[in-house]
Image: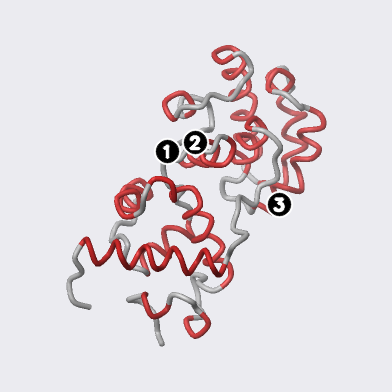
Amino acid sequence: MPRESKKARRERAEEVYDLLLETYPDAHCELDYSNAYELTAATILSAQCTDVRVNMVTPELFRDYPTAEELAAARQEDVEEIIRSTGFYRNKARNLIGMAEAVVERHGGEIPRTMADLVKLPGVGRKTANVVLGNAFGIDEGVVVDTHVKRIAGRLRFTRQTDPVKVERDLMELFPRERWTLLSHLLIFHGRALCPARKPRCGECPVAHLCPSATV
C-alpha cells in the first residue's frame, strides 16, 4: 500500500466512521448500569471478563451495595462471593472496596468527573476512566482501547502501534474529540460482528474497500 498522507488517512477514517455508524446505529456500552458509581464498579469487574458475565453478577452486587458508602463498608469475603465468577475475584473485590473508600473519603461519595481524579482510585486505570467519563458523564476525554479496538485500528492502518496508550493517542489525533466515545463502541461492535481475531468476514464488511487488510 502506498504511503498515505495524514489528510487522506483522516478522510478515510471519517468515511469508515460514517459507514460503521450506519451499520451499527445502536452501538453503546454493553455494561448494565444506572449511574456513574455502578459503571465504575462494572468496568473494574470487566477486566479479563466478558460484559455478559459482568452483567450477570452486578444486579446482586448493586442490590447489596447500592452506594459507594455501603460498598466501602463491605466485608471483602462477601464481595468476593458475589463476583467470584468474573475471575481474579480477590483482587477485584479489593479494588472495588478500595475504590469505594476513596470515593467516600476524597469525593463525598460521588464518582469524580476528571481523568486525574479517576485514575487515582484503586482499580481504575486510563481505560476504565475513559469508559466512565464518556458513558456516565458524556465527557470525551479519550478513546477506550480494548482488544477489539486495538485489533481493528491496526487492520485499518489507523495505527501501527500495539501499546494501548499509543494506539489511543493515534486514534485521538485521527478522529475529532466528539467522536471518541462512540468510536470505541463502533469498533467493538464491528469486532464482535464481522472482524474477529480469527477469520474476519471481509466479504460482508461495510468498510472492506477502505481497509488495507481486507482479503476481498
* Residue at the disc numbered 1: 141
Cα separation between marks 3 and 1:
27 Å
- Quadrant of image for the C terminus: bottom left
Q: Secondary structure at mark 1?
A: loop
Q: Is residue 163 above or below residue 141?
A: below
Q: CA distance from mark 1 to mark 2?
A: 9 Å
Q: Quadrant of residue 116?
A: top left
Q: Nearer the viewer, mark 3 or mark 1?
A: 1
Q: Separation of disc 3 and disc 2 at Cα?
A: 21 Å
Q: Closer to the N terminus: mark 1 or mark 2?
A: 2
User: Considering only vertical position in the picture, is 191 above or below 103?
Assistant: below
Total marks drawn?
A: 3
Q: Position of residue 113 (x, y in %)?
A: 51, 27
**Disc 3 residue type?**
Arg
Residue holding disc 2: 129
Are the residues at dot 1 and dot 2 in contact (C-beta closer than 8 Å)? Answer: yes
Task: Please tell me how crowded label 2 is: few (under 14), some (14-19), or many (20+) other residues with Cα within 10 Å.
Answer: many
At 34% across and 56% down in the image, what residue appears? 162
Indicate the amino acid at tag 1: Glu
**Of labels 3 and 2, the one closer to you:** 2
Q: Residue at x 45, y 58 (%)?
A: 149
**Crowding near the residue tagged with mark 3, few <14, some 14–19, many ≥20 C-alpha atoms within 10 Å:** some
The residue to which callout 3 is attached is 53
The structure residue drawn at horizontal position 61% and vertical position 21%, both measured from the top left corner, is: 110
Disc 2 marks a residue whose amino acid type is Ala
Front position among marks 1 and 2: 1
Q: Are marks 3 and 2 in contact (CB under 8 Å)?
A: no
**What x and y, as percent, mark residue 8?**
24, 67
